[in-house]
Every structure is written in C-alpha cells, then in structure tokens.
Image (cartoon, coloured by chain):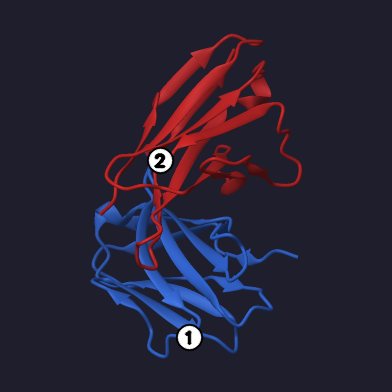
Amino acid sequence: AQKITQTQPGMFVQEKEAVTLDCTYDTSDQSYGLFWYKQPSSGEMIFLIYQGSYDEQNATEGRYSLNFQKARKSANLVISASQLGDSAMYFCAMRERDSSYKLIFGSGTRLLVRP
Amino acid sequence: GAVVSQHPSWVICKSGTSVKIECRSLDFQATTMFWYRQFPKQSLMLMATSNEGSKATYEQGVEKDKFLINHASLTLSTLTVTSAHPEDSSFYICSAREPEGSYNEQFFGPGTRLTVL
C-alpha cells in the first residue's frame, strides 16, 4: 500500500488566488513527520513546511500553511496569494519514527499558476 | 540554511562506462546521506542510505553492485553507477542529514542529470 498519496497530478490556479494541494498518508506510527517540498523545473528540492504528528497547531510558513487532519491522515498544503513563480512540482513526504530519517515521497502535483 | 552540493550537475556517457557522482555537505557534518533517483515526471525514489564509516543500506530492488556508494568522510558521499546503460539515465539527487539540526534535517543537493548513450 502506498504510504503517501497525492491524488492530483496537475492543478491550475489563477494568480493571486489560493490553492490547496492534497496529501494523505498511511502509517501505524504515533510519531512521524510530514513535509512539503517544491521542485521547480531546475530540479532542486526546496523545503516548504513541516508538520510533526504531535503538533497541535497547523504549521504555517509565510504564504504556505499545512491543513493537518490527523484523524483523516491528511496533510494538505495551502498556498495563499499564488504567484507565477509558484508554478512547479510539489511533493508531500513522510518520515516515520523508526525509518533512519529517510523520507517517503508522494507522486507529486504539478501546479500551474495562470496570469 | 545548510548547503549541499553535487558534482557534476550533468553528465553524458557511453554505455558500459562508469560514472561517479559526488555529494558534499558544505557547512555541516553529515553522518547520514541519502541517494534518490527520479525518472522524468515521476517522484523521488530512495535508492540507499549512506552512513559515514559503514556500508550503505540499499532499498529493495536496488542493485548494490551496480550503484556503489561510499561515505568516506562526514562531508562527502559518492555514488558510482557502474557499467551504465541507457536505462540508468535519470536524475540523481542526494540529501544530507545534519544531526544537530531542527526538524528540517535533510538538505538536498541540486541533482545530477545522467544520460547514458
């Protein structure tokens, strides 16, 4: 079974609007971490935001926020006020407690911001 | 933030040759480094975990004799693709873990694009 599922292969959003990228995960661990990365066409992986399983509040980093719903095992990324430079691939990833710190990535969502 | 470099950024080689890719942590010591492979329009797949001073741990399905990993120092890990073939053409990305870092412990290199003719 897939551990990280991103069901949206591609998304469009109008510039200046908000967009939500979905991510669901599967784990039996109580302690885990969830990450979102952005990968522009250059290929570099840019860290965006982190949510720990024990964090009670949703993580926020500037225009990025993570809608963490633990019972549903979802960790959706919300990008507010989209910019043209936000066009990229976005990956959700999970690190389980006893995983030697390795990350498991979802299949990614390609976001295109329309002017 | 911490910086990880990779060299070369791209390489083209003939089938049957071996290619070495370096991953360096520039401003921190990385006890653990990770090697990922990414095919076009696909996700990152972990190939192996590289620990300084010990043998790498390979993920299921990854040939350890094909993808040789050496983590000889706290700032350098190398991936050697031996006897490369066209199906090995891919984007290879490393990441390094900073032991004393915060939750964002893995820092990614810029990647190496390998094309095998």
Residue pointed to by mark 1 = A54
Q: Chain of mark 1?
A: A
Q: Chain of mark 2?
A: A
Amino acid type at circle 1 is: Tyr
Q: Position of residue B104 (x, y in %)?
A: 38, 63
Q: Quadrant of the N terminus of chain A?
A: bottom right
- Dividing the picture into quadrants, the one containing residue A17 is bottom left
Give left or right: position of B23 versus A79.
right
Q: Position of residue B69 (x, y in %)?
A: 58, 32
- Residue displayed at 59% across by 41% down: B54
Q: Eyeballing the image, is A29 above or below A102? A: below
Chain A rendered in what hue? blue
Q: Eyeballing the image, is A40 above or below B1? A: above
> Marks 2 and 1: same chain?
yes
Q: Quadrant of the C terminus of chain A?
A: bottom left
Q: Callout 2: 10 Å neighbours few (<14), some, many (20+)? A: some
Q: Position of residue A68 (x, y in %)?
A: 47, 82
Give left or right: position of B93 versus A44.
right
- Dividing the picture into quadrants, the one containing residue A59 is bottom left
Q: Residue furthest front?
A: B53
Q: Eyeballing the image, is B3 above or below A50? A: above
Amino acid type at circle 2 is: Gly
- Residue displayed at 69% across by 26% down: B66
- Give the chain ID for the red colour: B
